Amino acid sequence: MDEQALLGLNPNADADFRQRALAYFEQLKISQDAWQVCAEALAQSIYSDDHIKFFCFQVLEHQIKFKYSELTEVQQQLIRETLITWLQAQMLNPQPEKTFIRNKAAQVFALLFVTEYLTKWPKFFFDILSVVDLNPRGVDMYLRILMAVDAELVDRDVVHTSEASYFALAFEARRNTLLKDTMREQCIPSLVESWYQILQNYQYNNSELTCQCLEVVGAYVSWIDLSLIANERFINMLLGHMSVEVLREEACDCLFEIVNKGMDPIDKTKLVESLCQVLQSAGLFSIDQEDDVDFLARFSKLVNGMGQALIASWTKLIKNGDMKSAQDTLQAIEAKVALMLQLLIHEDDDISSNIIGFCYDYLHILKQLSALSDQQKANVEAIMLAVMKKLTYDEEYNFENEGEDEAMFVEYRKQLKLLLDRLAQVSPELLLASVRRVFNTTLQNWQTTRFMEVEVAIRLLYMLAEALPVSHGAHFSGDVTKATALQDMMRTLVTSGVSAYQHTSVTLEFFETVVRYEKFFAVEPQHIPAVLMAFLDHRGLRHTSPKVRSRTAYLFSRFVKSLNKQMNPFIEDVLNRIQDLLELSPPENGYQALLSSDDQLFIYETAGVLIVNSEYSAERKQVLMRNLLTPLMEKFKVLLEKLMMAQDEDRQMALADCLNHAVGFASRTSKAFSNKQTVKQCGCSEVYLDCLQTFLPALSCPLQKEVLRSGVRTFLHRMIICLEEEVLPFIPSASEHMLKDCEAKDLQEFIPLINQITAKFKTQVSPFLQQMFMPLLHAIFEVLLLPAEENDQSAALEKQMLRRSYFAFLQTVTGSGMSEVIANQGAENVERVLFTVIQGAVDYPDPIAQKTCFIILSKLVELWGGKDGPVGFADFVYKHIVPACFLAPLKQTFDLADAQTVLALSECAVTLKTIHLKRGPECIQYLQQEYLPSLQVAPEIIQEFCQALQQPDAKVFKNYLKVFFQRAKP
C-alpha cells in the first residue's frame, strides 16, 4: 500500500496528507484487487496503526456492498476466511482493538451475513460461535455482530427519499423478511441459548458484556418467538438483574422490549401482571426521590410500557366484546395508577416525562366510561394536582439565556399541556374548580409568593382557554358557571396588581393571558385603561428586559386590534404615549433603542389600526396619519442624501438598512386598511402618494441597490392594493429604474410586481405593458445568457427561478386577456417570445416551468388558433406546439412518477385538447397522416390516440395521455 498516502489517515495529519489519503481511498475502491491487499493486512495483522486497520475494513466494506457479485467463488471464500482469521486473532492479542474498529468489523460481518447467509454461508452464526466460545473478547465481537445484523435487518429509522430508493427499500424489505424467517427456522433457538449462557456466565463478573447481551436480547425480541425469552428461566434472570446496580438499566430496557411485543391481549395481561408481582415484591414499586435518577428514568419507561400494553389489551378486549377479561385488565391498570402518580410527580422531569403516555391513555379510558368510581375521581384529581405542580419552573431555569435544559423543559410543558387538555375532557368541572382554587389562593398573596408559583397560577388560567374550547373565544357567554368562573379570574388578574410582579416570566404570562381572553374586555370594558397602561409603561413596552419589550410589542398590536371600537376614548392618548417608540433609530453604532426595528413594525401597525378604526372624520384621520408618516419621510430624505455621499461601505450599509426600515414602517401602517375602511374613504391617499414620491428616488441611488430596491418594491406592492389606480402614474418611472443594471434576483423579484399590476388593472395598463414588454424581456434574456461556471449551483438555481418568473409573467399577460401586448411587439419579437415558450416546455427539465409554458401555449391557441387568428399562427401550431406536446413527455428527464411532472403533463393534454377544439378535423388529420407516423407510432395506436383526443370528457384524455407516454418510454 502507498505508505505516504496512509499517513493522511491520522486525524492530526495536515490537509494535504488528508487529501491524498482520501484520493487513495477512492483509487482503492475502483481498483480490482486492492481489497485483497487490505484483507491480507487484516488477516496477518501487518499494521498496528488503528486508522489504517479501520481504513482496510472500509475498503472491504465497499467491496462487499457494491462489487461482491464481481468476485469469483475463491475470492469470496477468501473474504470469509479473512474475517474469521481476524476474529480468532482478537482472542490472542495482548490488547483489545479500539471500539471504533470493533464496530466497523461488526458492520462488515453483518454485510457479509445479509449477502451470503441464504446461499453460501448458512452456518454463519455457528462458525462465529465455534470460534469465540465463551472467550470475553470473542463474546464482545459476537454481540457486536448480532447488533449490526439486527441494524441491517430491522430498519427502525428509514426515511423514504425518492421513488428509486423506495423500490430499493422494498427489495431490501423482502430480502430482510426472508433472512429473518430463515434465521427463525435455523438458528434463533441456538442464538437464544448462547445469550442465556453468556448472561449466566458473566452476570456477576463482567457487567459490560452482560449489558451488551441484554441489549441484544432487547433488540431481537421484537421479531423472534417471544416464548423463547418470556419464560421462567430468562425472566427470573432478568428480574435478578433488576436488583444489580450496574445491570438494572439494561435489564429494564430489555423487559420494556418484551412487554412491548405484540401478542394476544389476555396473554399480554398475564405477562405484565406476573412481571409486576415480582417487581413489586422486590420493592421496586416504592419510589424514593433519592434513588438513582438514570435507573428511575428507565424504570419509568418500563412502567409506561406495561401500562400502555395493558390499555392496548383492554381496548382490544372491549372491541372483541370480552367484557369479563376487559374488566380484569382494567383492574390491573387501576392497580398501577399509584405507581404512575409517584413517577409523574417525581422531581426529575425525564422520569416524569417517560410516564406521560400511560397517564394520557389512562385518562382516555376514563373518558369512555359512563360513570367514574370514587377512586377514579380521586385518581383524576391526583393527576391534575401532579400536572399543576410539574408545570412549575424550578430555581435553576435561566430566563435570560435559555439553553438546552430550558428547551427540554419547554417541550416537557407541552406534554403536560396535552395531559391538562385530556383532563378537561374527562372532568371539565373538576379542572375549572382546581384551577380556580390555585389561582385565587396564589393571587391573593402574590406579593409574598415565589415567582414560579405566581407564573403557574396565571399559566393555568391561560391554558384553560384551549382546555375548555369554545367557538371564537366566547368564554364569557353560554355556560354560566364556566363564564362566571373565568370572568372572576380575569377580573382578579387585572385588578390584583400582579402585572407589577418583578419577574419576566410573570410579566409575560400576564400579557399573554390578557390577550388570550380579549373578549373579557367587551364584558367589563372598565378595565381597559389599566391594562393599556401596563402595556405602555415599565411593565411592558418600557420593561428592562428586551425579551419582554419585544413580545409585548406583538401582544400590544393584537390587543388593540381585538378591542377595535372600544379603543376610541384612548386613541390620542395612546398615540402620544408611543411617540418615542416610533422614532427611526439612527444608523450610528452603539445606539440602543428600546425596540428593535422588527418590534417597531408592530407599533407602527398598531398606530395605523388606532387611526383607521377610530370614529374620527376623514380629515382628522388624514391629519393623524400625516403626523405618523411625515417624520419618516423627512428622515428618509436626509438619510438618502447622506447615503449618496457616504464613502465607507459599512456606513453605506447602515444607512441603507435605516432607509429600508423607514419604508417598511410606512408600508406596515397600510395593513390597517380593509375593504370597509379603504385608504380613499379614510382620506389618506394623499399621505401615501407623498410617501411614494419620497421613497421612489431611492431606486436611482447607485449604492446598496439590492436593499433599497427590495424595500421600495415591497412598498409598491402594498400601494397597488391600497391606492389602486392612483398608483399607476408612478409605475413607469419606477419600472425603468428597477430594470437598470439588474441581476437575476432583482428581475425575479420585480416580475411579481408587474404581474400584480397586470392582473389587477388589466387593460388599464396595456399601453404601459406594451412599452416596457421588450425592455423587460431584453433584461431577462441578457441575464439568462450570461455565462456561468459549470459547477456554480447557486447561479444555475437563480437562472432557473428567473426562467420560471419570466414564464409566470407571460402567463399573467395572456391570462389577463391582454395577448395584444405580445401581438403588438412586431412579428420578429412575437416569434422570439413564442420560441422561448416552446423551449421552456421541451428543453429545460423543470416541471414547474414546463407546466406554465403549456398553460401559455393553450391560452394562445385559444386566443389565436381559430380561423381568424394572426397570419402564420396555424402553421406555428402544427410545426412547433404539437411537436412540443410529444417531445417534452418523451424526454428521459420527464419523470411521470413525479407529482409536479404529472401536473405539467395535464396542461400538455389541455393544450392538445384546445388545438383540437380550435382546428377541428384538420388537427386529427394532421396527427393521423403526418405527425404521429413520423414518430413511428403504430397505426392502431394512432387510431386509439385520436379517438381519446376526440372524447368530450377532458379527464379521459388526460388519463390516456399518461398511459400513452408510459408505454412509449423505454
Image (cartoon, rainbow, N blue to C red):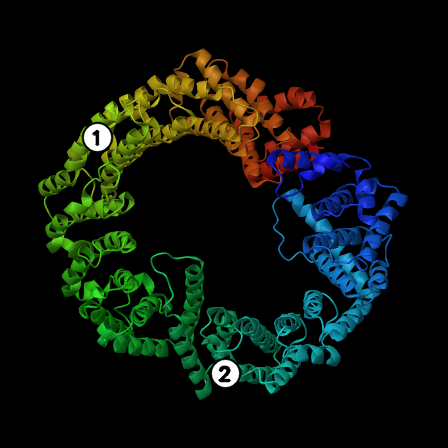
Where residue 640 appears, as percent x and y from the top left, is 23, 27
Asked whether the beta carbons under mark 2 and mark 1 sit within 8 Å of each other, the answer is no
In percent of the image, x 56 and y 85: which residue is there? 331
In this view, 16 is above or below 152: above
Q: Quadrant of the C terminus?
A: top right
At mark 2, the secondary structure is: helix
Tell me where residue 906 appears, x and y as whole percent.
Answer: 55, 36
Q: Is residue 866 visible?
A: no
Along the viewing direction, whichever of 773 and 760 lies nearer the viewer: 773
Q: Residues within 10 Å of mark 2 (few under 14, many from 20)?
A: some
Residue 902 can be seen in this image: yes
Q: Give the percent coordinates (x, y) of residue 456.
A: 33, 70
- For the point 70% across and 81% down, the residue is 236
Q: Label 2, on which residue? A: 338
Residue drawn 36% across the image and 79% down it: 430
In front: 762, or 509?
A: 509
Q: Secondary structure at mark 1?
A: helix
- Disc 2 and disc 1: Cα gap in Å? 69 Å
- Quarter of the image with the N terminus is top right
Comparing labels 2 and 1, the label whose residue is closer to the camera:
1
In this rendering, position of residue 536 left or right of residue 4:
left
Is 270 above or below relative to 174?
below
Residue at numbered disc 1: 639
